[in-house]
Structure formats: structure tokens, C-alpha cells
Amino acid sequence: MAACTQCGSELPAGARFCAACGARVPEAVEPPAPQAFPGGYVVPAPPTDGQAVAALVLGILGLVFCPIVCSIIAIVLGKTSQRKIESSGGTLGGLGMAKAGWVLGIIGLVIGLLWIVFFGLIAGASIFGGFMDPNIDIYN
Ligand SMILES: [Zn+2]
């Protein structure tokens, strides 16, 4: 028989609180399992908007594989999906994804444009520098 840690009085088996002092009994009965719906049915979250997923994927692709093109599509899809989800009244999910795709798209676009400028400058400098370089053997 367990005893109350607060007042020492005996506790009936399975008691969660001491009848004498009202202290909570540590390690009492295991907490009731979360009430599952019959058949293990879980309250459905609103379905994620497909465009939100696409925007996120394209946003990532735009950062990794194909900047500019994927990024622009990600921005468009992300914005469209965001509007759609916001006006769906909670029947569509994935707003976070849509926003993330949109942001990633913008980041990818900016990075892509910076690369173009960067490589453009390098290419321009090397072409221009090539003509100016006295060591280059243009006669082969
Ligand atoms: Zn007690």
C-alpha cells in the first residue's frame, strides 16, 4: 500500500490524490490514453493546396538547380496558392508552404540575377581583358 509523500497517510490503490491532504500522488494510475476516434479516425486537416506544394518544390529547385525559371514559377504559384488558401475559409491548407515557396522563389530569382550579373561581368572582363592582354597569342 502506497503512502502519501506529503502527510504519510495510506493511499488506496490507484489513488491519484491523497484523501487526507489532497496532494497529488506521484506515479499514480497511468494517464488516460488520448481519446481516439472510433476506428482510429483522426480529425482531417484541410487538404494542402497542390499549388502550395508545387511552389515550395519549385522554390527549392530554383535555389538548387534551375534559378530564374523555377523561381519565377514558384513566385507565381506561391502567390496564387496563398490567395486561394486565404480565400478558402479554412478548407485548404498549406499556407506556410505557399509563403515559403514564394519567399524561396524571390530569393532564387535574386540569386539567379546576381549570378547572371556576376558571370556577365566576368565574361565581359575576360573578353575585354583578352584583347588587352599582351601575352595572349591571338595568332596561334
Ligand atoms: Zn497526504
Image: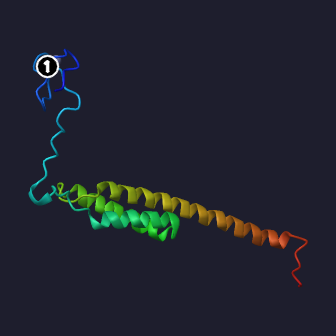
Q: Is residue 126 left or right of residue 92?
A: right
Residue 90 place in picture, x, y as percent: 18, 55
**Figure check: 58 above or below 82:** below
Q: Quadrant of residue 51?
A: bottom left
- Residue at image x 80%, y 68%? 129
- Is the image coloured rainbow, by chain, by secondary structure, or in one colour? rainbow
User: Where in the image, quadrant-wise, is ligand 1 located?
Assistant: top left
Measuring from the top left, give residue 12's x and y in whole percent.
Answer: 10, 27
* Disc 1 residue type (three-letter): Gly
- Residue 123 falls in image quadrant: bottom right
- Left or right for 29, reference 66: left
Q: Is residue 26 above or below residue 86?
A: above
Residue drawn at (38%, 62%) of the image? 56
| Pick the front one: 96 or 45 | 45
Q: Identify the residue under disc 1.
A: 22
Ligand 1 lies under 8 Å from the Cβ of mark 1: yes
Q: Nearer the viewer, residue 63 or 123?
A: 63
